[in-house]
Amino acid sequence: DIVMTQSPDSLTVSLGERATINCKSSQSVLHTSNSKNYLAWYQQKPGQPPKLLVYWASTREYGVPDRFSGSGSGTDFTLTISSLQAEDVAVYYCQQYCTTPLTFGQGTKVEVK
Amino acid sequence: EVQLVQSGAEVKKPGATVVISCKVSGYTFTDYCMHWLQQAPGKGLEWMGSVDPKDGETRYAQKFWGRVTITADTSTHTAYIDLSRLRSEDTAVYYCATGLNREATTRTPFFDSWGQGTLVTVSS
């Protein structure tokens, strides 16, 4: 199984400041056949299902604000919120969809300072 | 509009079986695998398995192998998950989810469509 490890577990950021979440996979999720990284990011607020933010490591889902961006390749990935807004308080998860079992990071809780 | 509507909350005793349904609308049910995920209270997301409604082919995570059965009824556009021999650690919210983005690979997708979740409480 591919193990996904996020850091930090929690993050406290002032409104308008940058938040950075890291995700590391135990093996590469880069498919050499198409040069795509099979890595997605989700946002989950209490009582709600997760919401897709980014796929292919850096493609923003339709309707997601451009303050959210994904980067990285191979085994190391980052989700950046460029200017934290109050509505961004949530838990964020990375997921690899390279192979089954599909696996997720343990989550990073983002709070406002 | 795509909708995945799950059945309501359940309370079960240890050793029992729970069945959760996920009725879909707004897309062609047989074109996309349906996946099920578990989220224990305060915990992360765990993939349990999937079914291809087109041919009924299933895939399960090893953790749940032997206790989980995922099926799809194409006549009612509904997917089901059965989890048997319940124990307290199965107390969780269960989600059905699928990837409808044409770039997603149906058997190993990123999930852009989710059910609302079903809370299962296992308690004696």
Image (cartoon, rainbow, N blue to C red):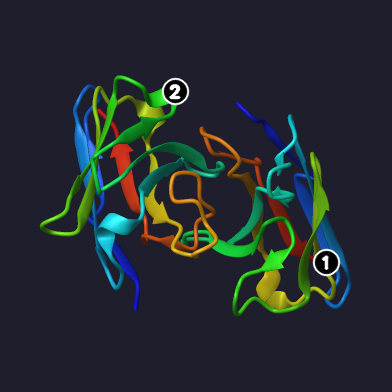
The residue that appears at 22% across and 29% down in the rendered structure is: B13
Does the CB distance between marks 2 and 1 fall below 8 Å? no
Disc 2/disc 1 C-alpha distance (Å): 38 Å
The residue that appears at 37% across and 36% down in the rendered structure is: B91
Residue B75 figure quarter: bottom left
| Residue B60 on image: x %, y % | 38, 30
SS at mark 2 in the image: helix
Residue that carries the numbered disc 2 in the rendered image: B63
Residue that carries the numbered disc 1 in the rendered image: A113
Query: Could you tell whether A29 is left or right of B44 in the image?
Result: right
The amino acid type of the residue labelled 2 equals: Lys
Q: Nearer the viewer, residue B109 or A83?
A: B109
Looking at the rendered image, the disc whose residue lies closer to the viewer, 2 or 1, is 2
Q: Nearer the viewer, residue B83 or B2?
A: B2
SS at mark 1 in the image: loop
| Residue B77 on image: x %, y % | 19, 59
The amino acid type of the residue labelled 1 equals: Lys
